Every structure is written in C-alpha cells, then in structure tokens.
Amino acid sequence: MGCQACREGAELPFDFTMAFQPIVDIAARTVFAYEALVRGVNGEGAGTVLAAVDADNRYAFDQACRVKAIELAAALGLPATGARLSINFMPAAVYRPENCLRTTVQTSNAVGMPLDRLMFEVTENEPVNDPAHLLGIFHEYRRRGFLAAIDDFGAGYAGLTLLAKFQPDILKIDMELTRDVANRPVSRTIVAAIVQVCQTLGVTVVAEGVETEDELATLRAMGITLFQGYLFGRPAFQALDKPVGL
C-alpha cells in the first residue's frame, strides 16, 4: 500500500522548495551541516506546504522532499563545502525503509552527493505509534552509512524512552530548553544532564534555537560545540549562506 501510494502519487498537487539553515561547529569553526527546511515556491512557511499533505500524498511528499533537498543542495554546491545535508523525515511516511531509500540513493549518485554526507532527522514532536518501525528505519539508515538524528529533544513524546531504545548519532536539544538558558537554572540543570548522558552514550549534541551570546557561552561551558539558531544564520531561501561569525 505505502509503496504503491508513493509510485502512484509521484505527481504532487502542489509545488515546494527548500531553505537551508546552517548547523555550525564552533570548535572547528566550520559548517557541520545545512538543514533543509520546506518552503513554498514564493517563500511561504513550512506550515503552508504541510497543510496540503494528507494520507493520500504523504508517501510521495516524503520522497519528494528527499529528492528536492538533495538536488537543490547539490546545485548550490554543498558537496564542495564539506558540510552535511540534514533532511527531516516522517516515520509514518516510510513504508519499507530499504525500498524508500532507493530513490534517495539514486538521486544522490546522480547529482554527486556523497551518501556519507546525508543526515536524517526525526522530530520528537511526532507521536511514535510504532517504536519498532522507527527503530527499523534508524537501523537501515545507519546500515547505509547515513547519520541519524533525533530533533527537538525535550519537547515531544518520546524523550528518554526513544534514546534508551536507540542511540542516534546526533541529538538536537529543543529551543524551549536552550532559550534564555543563562538565566534559567532549571533549564541549565536539564540541559547539563542531557549532555552528560549523551557523552556517556557517545551521542553528539546540537543546541537548537541559539539566539544570544549569553546562551552560546552557557551552552559552550557545558561542552556543546554544535549550534543552530539565528545567532549564526536564519534559514536562507534556496541558498547556502555562510554563518555569521565563522
């Protein structure tokens, strides 16, 4: 059913494109990755596009997002930068991961995007109705050499349960925890605990939503070196902007 829906729904009833936001490595002073974020063709926000996604086209949309992100990033010269490309995915739109990745691999090979530069993020805000299915997706991604990431950690449904069952390569701490962290003792305690757990498990931490120098200094003191947020750069519409400060 899922594979058939993807094939038959290849022509979506709407168009979309991507913006790219940098994830910076402060220690190395380089761009670790650019995250591909869905946008309307005239710059409309992701919500406008996602509102048109339904049960009939979600398989095709998830596949189209991968293709669009890879093709556009390659056209913008991402492979030459040495950075990774981070792509969000919807677990419910991945029917059989080994099949769904065929087009991803074919597209990457066609445009010269090295497979080991791809990172796939699942948001913790999406309910995990079938943990075994999600774990199967993660394991297939890792088998293929992709990086796997949990996005928005600390703001959603799965939390430590998901982390206990699968240790991703990357864990992105949600902006609700990093916002004004310098002045919020409880948030500092929680973030520090997350960082300590990840260090023990060998999981790399990204701090999301960093907007101020105080937030950056506080999070760096906890041992975090990867950051994403307006302090370094907003999502750039169909462009790979150089981060501020690098």
Image (spheres, rainbow, N blue to C red):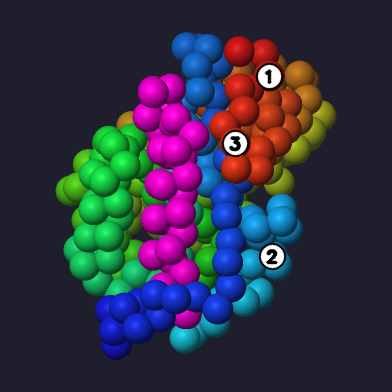
Residue 56, given in percent of the width and then of the height, sits at 47, 86
Above or below, 126 relative to 12 = above
Magenta span main SS = helix
Pick the front one: 187 or 104: 104
Of 160 and 26, which appears nearest the observer?
26
The percent coordinates of residue 224 (x first, y second) are: 54, 24
What type is the residue that disc 2 sits on? Gly
Looking at this view, is 180 or 134 the one in front?
134
Residue drawn at point x = 40 percent, y = 46 percent: 70
Q: Look at mark 1 in the image and give the residue it sits on.
A: 244
Q: Are marks 3 and 2 in contact (CB under 8 Å)?
A: no
The reply to whether dot 1 and dot 3 touch (C-beta < 8 Å) is no
The residue that appears at 62% across and 28% down in the rendered structure is 241
Query: In the rendered image, which quarter contains the N terminus?
Result: bottom left
Labels 1 and 2 touching (C-beta < 8 A): no
Residue matched to label 3? 239
Residue 191 seen: no
Q: Earlier in the sequence, mark 1 or mark 3?
A: 3
Q: Position of residue 87 (x, y in %)?
A: 45, 49
Q: State the separation of the CA atoms marked 1 and 2.
A: 27 Å
- The residue type indicated by label 3 comes to Ala
**Observer able to see residue 9:** yes
Q: Is residue 12 above or below residue 38?
A: below
Magenta extent = 57-85
- Left or right: residue 89 versus residue 17 is left
Spatial CA span between label 3 and label 2: 20 Å
- Residue displayed at 31% across by 42% down: 111
Within 10 angstroms of label 3, few (less than 14), some, or many (20 or more) residues?
Answer: some
Is label 1 in a helix, a strand or a loop?
A: loop
Q: Which mark is residue 47?
A: 2
